Image (cartoon, rainbow, N blue to C red):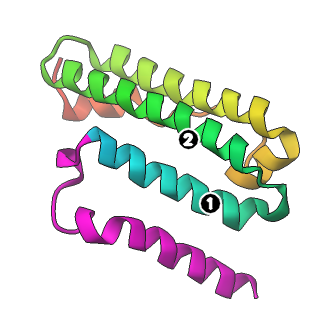
Amino acid sequence: MQDEELATYLEKVHAIYSGEVSEIKQSTIDPDSKINFLGKELELMADFRLGELKKSQTIKTLQDIQAEMVLEKEKLDAQLIEKNISTVHYADQVNANILKFLNESKKNLGEEAYIKLFGMASDTIFQIVDPKILAQYHQD
């Protein structure tokens, strides 16, 4: 049963992106569309992973925080491209924004739902953007 549920979930996630993302580069998608796509994906992930633990208002709150994170990343992306910030500063800021989202998620979800939703303990620390790898592909 779990495999069927996973397949259904993945099909729904694919459907969110397939119409637009397959036709254009992701970097050209406007921020509102990114927020919309990611919000829908978060909703599906909550449906799939939380089941009865899902609270719609909590997910809406997380979607709002996620939207703020996307808008902040858009600004950071522009600054990086224009060479107005270093790769280290960019990586630090993006990672801090993700940590903020995760911390707010823990506050809003509680430990049990957080672990179910994200598949990791709430005290797990990691970096999405590694400044050393980013520096290899982007010159300050």
- In the rendered image, which residue does mark 1 sit on? 45
Q: Quadrant of the N terminus?
A: bottom right
Q: Which stretch appears magenta?
A: 1-30
- Ranked by sequence position, the earlier of labels 1 and 2 is 1
Residue 67: % across, % down: 46, 35
- Residue 119 seen in the current view: no
At 81% across and 48% down in the image, what residue appears? 113
Left or right relative to 60: residue 82:
left
| Amino acid on which the number 1 mark rests in the picture | Met
At 15% across and 16% down in the image, what residue appears? 83
Mark number, residue 103: none
- In the rendered image, which residue does mark 2 sit on? 63
Residue 5: % across, % down: 67, 81
Q: CA distance from mark 1 to mark 2?
A: 12 Å
Left or right relative to 133: residue 5:
right
Crowding at dot 1, Cα within 10 Å, few <14 / some 14-19 / many 20+, comes out as: some
Magenta stretch: dominant secondary structure: helix
Question: Residue pushed farthest top?
Answer: 84
Q: Is residue 22 magenta?
A: yes
At 16% across and 60% down in the image, what residue appears? 24
- Residue 47 seen in the current view: yes
**Secondary structure under badge 1?**
helix
| Numbered disc in front, either 1 or 2 | 2
Left or right relative to 116: residue 63:
left
